[in-house]
Amino acid sequence: MSLRSPLGRVLGLGSAKDGTAHWWAQRVSAVALIPLTLWFMFSLLALPALDYATVRTWLSFPLSGFFAVLLLGVLTYHSYLGTTEVIEDYVHSAGMKVLSLLLLRFLYVLVCGAGIFAILRVAFGSSGS
Amino acid sequence: MPNPSARTRPTSPHLEIYRWQIGNSLSILHRLTGIALALGLPTLCYWLVSLAGGEQSYRAAAKLLGSPAGVFALIGWTFAFLYHFLNGVRHLFWDAGYGFERAQRHASGWFAVLGSIALTLCVWGLIFAGHRS
C-alpha cells in the first residue's frame, strides 16, 4: 500500500530518493576541510613575508601545489553545497530558483577552475608576464 | 504544474516567532559566515590567478587586498572562517551524538564565539607584528 496520494503522484511530488546525500556530502567535505584549511592558514602564517617571490616559491613546491588544488576543490564543493541550500530555502519562485541554482553552479565551476588552473601554472613553472 | 502559492495554505511558525537566544543566534551566524566565506572564494582565486600572472599582477592584487578596505575584509573573512570552523566542529560532534545537554550546548557555543574572536586577534596580531619587524 502506498501512502502517496494520487494527486501527489501525478504532480511528481514526494521522495526524490536522495534525502541524506546532500547532508552527508556536506559533513564529509567539512571533515576533509579541517586539515586542509589548517594547512593553508599555518603555511601562510609561517611564510616570512607575503611578497611575490616568497609566495611563488612556496606554491611551486609540489606538496604545496597538491594540497592547494585539493583545498580549492573541496572548498568549492562544500561552499557549493551550502549556498545551494540557502537558495533552496529562500528563493521561492520556481523559475528564479532554477535560474539562480544554474547560475550558481556555473559561477562555482568558473571560479574554481580559474583558481586550480592558476595553481597548476605556478606548479609547472610557466612564468607570467 | 499548478502554482502551489495560489491557494492559501496554513503555514508553520517561521523564524521571527522564536525568542532570540544563543542557540538560534549561532545557527544563523553559521549560515551568515558561510555566505561571507562563499564570497571570499572568488577573492582567493583572484589572488591565485594574480600570482600565476606574474609579479606585476600580484603587486596589483596585493595592493588592493592591502588597502584599508581590503584588510578590513580580510579580517572579516578570518573571523568568518574561524567561527565557521569551530562551530562546524561543534555540529560534527552533534552529528556523532555528543554534546546535546543544555550546559554543553551553551559552553560549546560560547567557545566557538569567543574562540574565533580570540584566534582572529591572534592571527592578525601575528601578521601586524611580522610587518613591523
Image (tube, grey):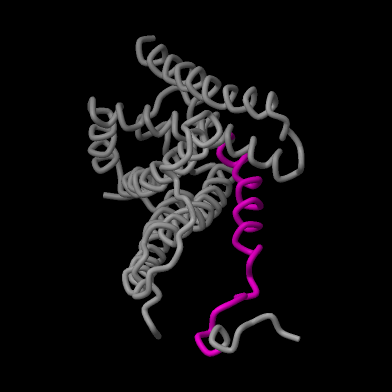
Report whether A106 appears left or right of A23. left
- Is A12 one of the magenta-colored residues? yes
Q: Nearer the viewer, residue B91 or A34?
A: B91
Q: Residue A11's x, y, as percent?
A: 50, 86
**The C terminus of chain B is located in which quarter?**
top left
Reply above or below: B40 against A78: above
Q: Quadrant of residue A101?
A: bottom left
Reply above or below: B37 against B80: below
Q: Residue at x 23, y 29 (%)?
A: B69
Q: Nearer the viewer, residue A83 or B43?
A: A83
Q: Residue at x 30, y 27 (%)?
A: B71
Q: How many marks?
A: 0
Report whether A30 appears left or right of A85. right
Q: Main secondary structure of the magenta part?
A: helix
Q: Which residues are magenta?
A: A10-38
Report whether B58 appears left or right of B119. left
- Is A55 one of the magenta-colored residues? no
Q: Nearer the viewer, residue A59 or B105?
A: B105
Q: Residue A123's x, y, as percent?
A: 48, 50
Reply above or below: A119 against B64: below
Q: Residue B45's x, y, as percent?
A: 38, 48
**The N terminus of chain B is located in which quarter?**
bottom left
Q: Residue at x 35, y 10 (%)?
A: B132
Q: Residue A71's x, y, as percent?
A: 54, 48
Q: Nearer the viewer, residue A85 or B25?
A: B25
From this viewpoint, which residue is outermost toward the top?
B133
